[in-house]
Each structure stands twice: as C-alpha cells, then as structure tokens.
Amino acid sequence: MFPTALPTRKRRRPEVALARGREEVKFRDVTLYLVERRMGKSRRNFLSNLARSKGFCVYDALSADVTHVVSEGNAPQELWSWLEEQGFGEMRDRHVLHISWFTESMSAGQPVPVEIRHYIQNPAVDQRSCAHPSAKQESTVSSYACQRRTTLNNHNKIFTDALEVLAENLEFCGDQGPSLAFRRAASVLKSLPAALRRLEDTQRLPYLGEHSRTIIEEIFECGSSSRVEEILNDERYRTMKLFSSVFGVGPKTSENWFCRGLRTFEQVLSEPSIRLNRMQTAGFLFYEDISKPVSRTEASALKIIVEEAVICVNPSATVSITGGFRRGKEFGHDVDFIIKTPEAGQEDVILPAVIERFKRQNILLYSDLQESTFDLRQLPTPRFEAMDHFSKCFLIVKLKCEQETDTRAARDWRAVRVDLVAPPLERYAYALLGWSGSTLFERDLRRFARLERGKLLDNHALYDKATTSYLKSGVYMTGRFTDHYLPPSSFRILWKFYLSRVAICCSLKAPKH
Ligand code: 8GT
Ligand code: MN
C-alpha cells in the first residue's frame, strides 16, 4: 500500500522545491506533480527536468497549488487513498492523470487538453456514481506501439479500415499531424485481443479521441461511416490514390496532376507538358505487375536470387529479409533485404556489384543506387523522421513464374519491387531494427527512447543524452522497452532485443504492427 511505501513524509514547502529550476515557466495555469511511487526516483527526476526544460512548472512536493498529478503504474485505489491522506481531495481544476497525458504533452511541447482517457478515476467516487465498470480501471493499453503486442489477427478491421481512409485522405491534403492521430487510433485498435462491442470500450484507450470515436459510433449505428463513404467517393481522394499508387509518384506530383485537371493515367501519359522521371517511367511501365501484392513464396524465391548474387560478389556476406515479411506478413508491396558484410568498406561496393550481376543475368528492369552518405560526425541527427544514410538501392527485377503471366507477350516473369540496404557492420543491428518496421512501430520506438529513456534512437545509433555518448552496439538500454512484448531479461542488448522480437514474432505465428 502507498502509505507504507511512501511513509507519511512531511510535505516540503513549495518554494524549496521550486528553487532549483531556473527555466522559464511558459504554462502558468498548469502545475505538475509526479508521483514517485512505481515511477522511481531517477525516472521522476528525469521526467521532471524534461518538463521544466519545456516550460512546465513542476513541484517536487504535493501542495494545494498542484493542478495536475501524474502517476504511472499505480492502482487507482492505492493512489487515491494516498492522495486523500495527503489532503489532496477532488476539486474542479485538479486533475489526477495517467502518464500518457504527460508524454503526449512533452511530445506536443505544451499541455495537451485533458481527455477522459487520461484520468485516473477515484474508484470510491466511481462506485458512488455507478460509473461504467470499465471506467474503474486504468488503461492497460500502452500509448507506444512498440509496447503493444499486435498480431495479424485484426479483430477491428471494420473500424481500422475506416480510420485509415481518414488518415490517408489527410496525408493527401498535407495534414500530417491529424493524419498521425488517426493512424495511431487504428494501430491501438489493431492491438486489441477482441472486437469492440460498444463505443464505451474505447473510453480508456490511448489516441481514441473525439473524432475517431464519432466515426466508430456511426459504424456501430449504421454499419459504415458517412464521412468515410464521402471520402471514398471524392474525386480528389480517388485521383490522388490512383496517381500515388505509381512507383515514383508522391503526394506532391499527384496533387500537381490533379490540379491540372488530369484524372486518369491515359490523360497523364498523353499530356505533352508532363515529363516523367526515370522512376515514374518505370512505375508506369510495370504498373500492373508491381501493384500486385508480392507473396511470401515469391519473397523467398527472390531471397535465393539476391543471396546468390551477394555470395558470388562476397562469400562472407549474408542476406536477411526485413520489412513486412520479417514481421510475419504474408503479402507485401515490395521485398526488403539487408546485407551484412563482415569486412569494413565492403558495404560500399557490394550493391553496385549485385546490380551489375542482375544486369548480366538480364533480370534488372530498373535500379536507383544511392551511395552511402553516412557520417558518424553528423550524429545524432535532430531530425526525428530522418531516413538512414546507408548504401541502398531501389530495384525492379524480373521474377520467374510457374505459369506465363502474359500470354500475348509470352513472358514467364513478373516484375517485383526490391529494396536492398547495406550498412557498415557496426551499424547493422540498428539498421535491421529500423528496416523491420512498421513505420509506426519505429516511430514509437524512437519516441519511447527519447521521452521515456532520454535517448535518441535512429537507424544508425543509440545516443544517450545524459552522458552525451553513444551506446555501443553490444550495450543496450535496460528497462521496459517493450514490456508487454518480451520478458524483461531480453532487454539488455539491442541486438538481443531485436532477435527476441523476431523470435517472438515467429512464435506468435502471425505478428504484425
Ligand atoms: P510492405 O509490406 O507494404 O512492403 O510494408 P513494409 O515492408 O513494412 O514497408 P516498406 O515501405 O517496405 O519499408 C520497410 C521499413 O523500412 C519501414 O518501416 C521504413 O520506415 C523503413 N525504412 C528505413 N529506411 C528506409 C529508407 O531509406 N527507405 C524506405 N523505403 N524505407 C526505409 O528504415
Ligand atoms: Mn516492404
């Protein structure tokens, strides 16, 4: 119980607690207090300093001036007993909140509006008001995708499909922020072990905000969402989706073509003022083939081809499948491979040699080789979403098929998109982790490292902000990187973490994020 773990300490005077921070307070109507119990002293200090550095006022002691109490991992009953014992009763403008509100606020750089899902309800009050039973428990679903166990078995497809249409439409409009909110909501629903039965089931879930809940509510009532239907029938959305399905055509080009009044591929291809680049030309040329999903069997056949070419160039090099197939997906839009070369410098020569070999074998339809721009001195990168700087190539290759794919052309192959990446050996673990995806998983892994562990993680390195040093590949942050995902003993080493993740993926049979 709380009182024993936190013996009734005399409350310190707020001015004593405030004296330490010299940072400017930006948000005057928010005064934070972080509960040390379960959070631990060092984490509490770290989070308090993080908040102060972002302009929040954080008290070390619980006083009447505190407006936002933040707790992590404490049972509501214990927490509230302790709070009441401290004289911190319920009042309007006083919030007792789950850590998710804090991390979201740190991420936003300002206090985010408090939503119902953020509250840690006082169970006594709940009982008195006969609130919904699910409201009594703190959410057990983490707000980080990397802490949620998610299988391929999506019990909430009807909702996640709808939310993803909304997200995609916002991406087409350039609204990345709101789009991410819908992607996060969909990702949370994908991790649930069962289908939602009623709207109230979403109450304690992270990222299920008002907009997502309105959509879900309508689907419960009518079987579909009128907003989603409207988008699916919208000319702009349909055209943007069509154009951006071409390899080499992103949202900007799609929008440009749409604004010029173009609506079909025929119109684009017959428009004299449009000059397609090499990638787009290949995208149109092989459109039919590369828009067909690639199966796991086809991915395995490609692995043999890539492996053979790689070994021929460098017998000590190895090839692994990454991307969606590594996560257990049965189909993908491409096949991603990572090449490990034990000798320093080999990573820069292997890809051009593999491309040459494919050319000689007459199986190369398109290649875009990007040489390494990796420079340790430029790390850590402040750009959160930065892609990596390793040697890589984006290819379209011929894959032989059992049956003729096109009787008119009498061809026995299909075109497949293949990505190859070749990092230096000492960066391999990070690159493998980064290329395994999914995009949201990677994003949340980085967010978790930054907000929860004070470390910067990307495809190249793991940087400790406190010690201003890089962690060697062999040393990994201890702690609860993916608590719900792996046993804690697996976390010491990044490498181990990665292998464990893969092992767990395999043991779950059909894992996905
Ligand atoms: P898929 O089944 O549709 O192919 O899905 P996927 O395999 O999960 O996605 P992908 O687009 O093929 O990308 C695989 C992962 O590699 C993603 O998580 C992506 O963020 C990551 N990735 C990097 N660096 C790079 C890069 O430079 N280019 C691309 N395209 N992806 C990269 O870490
Ligand atoms: Mn892929």
Image: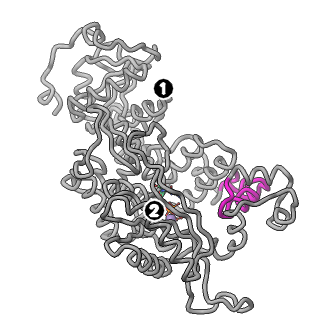
Which residue appears at 61% of the width and 50% of the height?
167
Amino acid bearing label 1 = Gln
Q: What element carries label 2?
A: strand
Which residue appears at 44% of the width and 35% of the height?
104
Q: How many labels does the image show?
A: 2
**Considering depth in this image, is 390 or 414 the residue closer to the camera?**
390
**Considering depth in this image, is 458 or 371 the residue closer to the camera?**
371
Residue 243 inside the magenta-drawn segment: yes
Q: In which quarter of the image is the C terminus?
A: bottom left
Q: Give the range drawn in magenta.
A: 225-250
Location of residue 128 (image quadrant)? top left
Location of residue 228 (image quadrant)? bottom right
Distance from Cα at disc 2 to Cα at disc 1: 38 Å
Residue, disc 1:
110
Which residue appears at 79% of the width and 58% of the height?
275
Label 2 lies in ligand 1 vicinity (Cβ under 8 Å): yes
Q: Residues within 10 Å of mark 1 (few under 14, many from 20)?
A: some
Image: 105 above or below 400: above
Residue, disc 2:
421
Residue 330 inside the magenta-drawn segment: no
Image: 262 above or below 460: below
Q: How crowded is mark 2: few (under 14 residues within 10 Å), some or many (20 or more)?
A: many
Residue 505, position as x, y percentages in the image = 34, 66
Which residue appears at 61% of the width and 56% of the height?
162
Give the main secondary structure of the magenta stretch.
Answer: helix
Q: Is residue 196 visible?
A: no
Amino acid bearing label 2 = Val
Q: Is mark 1 on a helix, strand or loop?
A: loop
